[in-house]
Image (cartoon, helix red, strand yellow):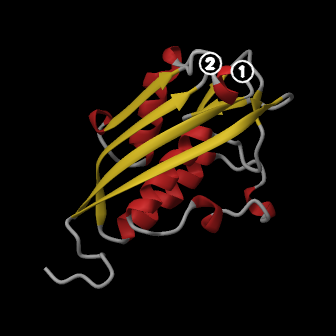
Amino acid sequence: MKETDGTALPMRVGIGYDVHAFAKDRPLIVGGVHIPGHAGLAGHSDADVLLHAVMDGLLGALALEDIGAHFPDTDDRYAGADSLKLLDAVWQMIDAAGYRLGNLDAIVVAQAPKMAPYIEKMRENIAGTLRAEISQVSVKATTEEHLGFTGREEGIAAKAAALLYRK
């Protein structure tokens, strides 16, 4: 198969990574879920670290730059933006390019708060936005055993890997 731009490949893989520091007086939103009782994350939009990693993974799979290129923090239209709506816009780009989700595997790295009570709702939010079955979306959480910035509870990181298939 001769490829010049990669658009005809039957499958594509992308990875995403994002990190945000904690910020007082902001709600904590992870995976489109409000997590009460904890400081939120600093950022131009709602700072949903998980969805930002997911978007970068999806965009990366098709070499469509990153979320900063599509939703720049210098653009007031995205101030406080709901990342589920941004994820929907990214998914429309993926769909328009002729791809569907094979699966998504994501991990949230946070010493606190505990993510376990919210994981299923995060999976539902992501799967619904990507027009996928929940079985295609994995979200996990881990700590870093008090090491690094997440271990010192200075912020949260997230990583995601996306597999896309040609329709």
Q: Is residue 87 above or below residue 126?
A: below
Label 2 or label 1, whichever comes before in sequence order: 2
Is 70 positioned to the left or the right of 11 in the image? right
The answer to whether residue 149 is visible is: yes
Report which quarter residue 112 is drawn in: top right
The answer to whether residue 32 is visible is: no
In front of the other: 22 or 96: 22
Asked which secondary structure carries label 1, the reply is loop
In the rendered image, the quadrant that contains the C terminus is bottom left
Tell me what residue is drawn at x 58 percent, y 54 percent. 86
Which residue was labeled with disc 1?
Answer: 152
In the image, residue 87 lies at what x, y percent?
52, 52
Q: Are marks 2 and 1 in contact (CB under 8 Å)?
A: yes
Tell me what residue is drawn at x 43 percent, y 69 percent. 63
Asked which secondary structure carries label 2, the reply is loop
In the image, residue 45 lies at what x, y percent?
72, 49
Which residue was labeled with disc 2?
Answer: 111
In the image, residue 89 lies at what x, y percent?
52, 60
In the rendered image, the quadrant that contains the N terminus is bottom left
Is 144 positioned to the left or the right of 161 in the image? right
Most extreme residue toward the left is: 1
Circle 2 or circle 1, nearest the eye: 1
Q: Amino acid at mark 2?
A: Gln
